[in-house]
Amino acid sequence: MQYLYPVWFFFAAVFSYLAYVHWRQSNTTIRHFFTRGLEDSKAQDPETFSVLAKFIADFNKYLEMVNASNKTMNRNAAVGYFVAAAVSVLALFLSAIVL
């Protein structure tokens, strides 16, 4: 039964790494969209400027929603992987005690 110790340790290491990756991923965001020269468009064609400004505002709201969703999903995945790592370590110690 000595072969179980490295297996549980390997699982704990993999789950810990995945928890770390997802936690770091939860802190990254997609930056807001903006256009250069938007003020020049305002001077040339006010109607195009208003349509473009509305699109940019709507698109940035969408990006905020995606960022919030990605943050939540990655944090949940990180917590799940951390729990799996903790269970692996617990199984490692229990197998050492029982066997």
Image (spheres, helix red, strand yellow):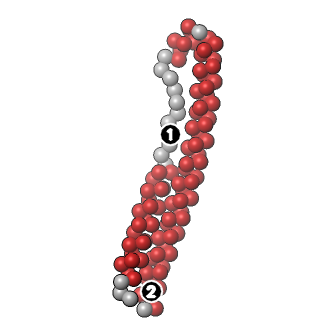
The quadrant of the image that shows the N terminus is: bottom left
The residue shown at (57%, 12%) is 42
The quadrant of the image that shows the C terminus is: bottom left
Q: Position of residue 29 (x, y in %)?
A: 50, 43
Give above or below for 37 relative to 3.
above
Amino acid type of the residue tagged 1 in the rendering: Ile
In the picture, residue 65 is in which quadrant?
top right
Dot 2 falls on a residue whose secondary structure is helix
CB atoms of marks 2 and 1 within 8 Å: no
Q: How far separated are the C-alphas under marks 2 and 1?
A: 44 Å
The residue shown at (56%, 7%) is 44
Q: Which residue is mark 1?
A: 30
Image mark for residue 95:
2
Q: Position of residue 96 (x, y in %)?
A: 41, 87
Mark 1: give few (<14), some (14-19) or many (20+) Cα within 10 Å.
Answer: few
Give above or below for 29 relative to 33.
below
Dot 1 falls on a residue whose secondary structure is loop
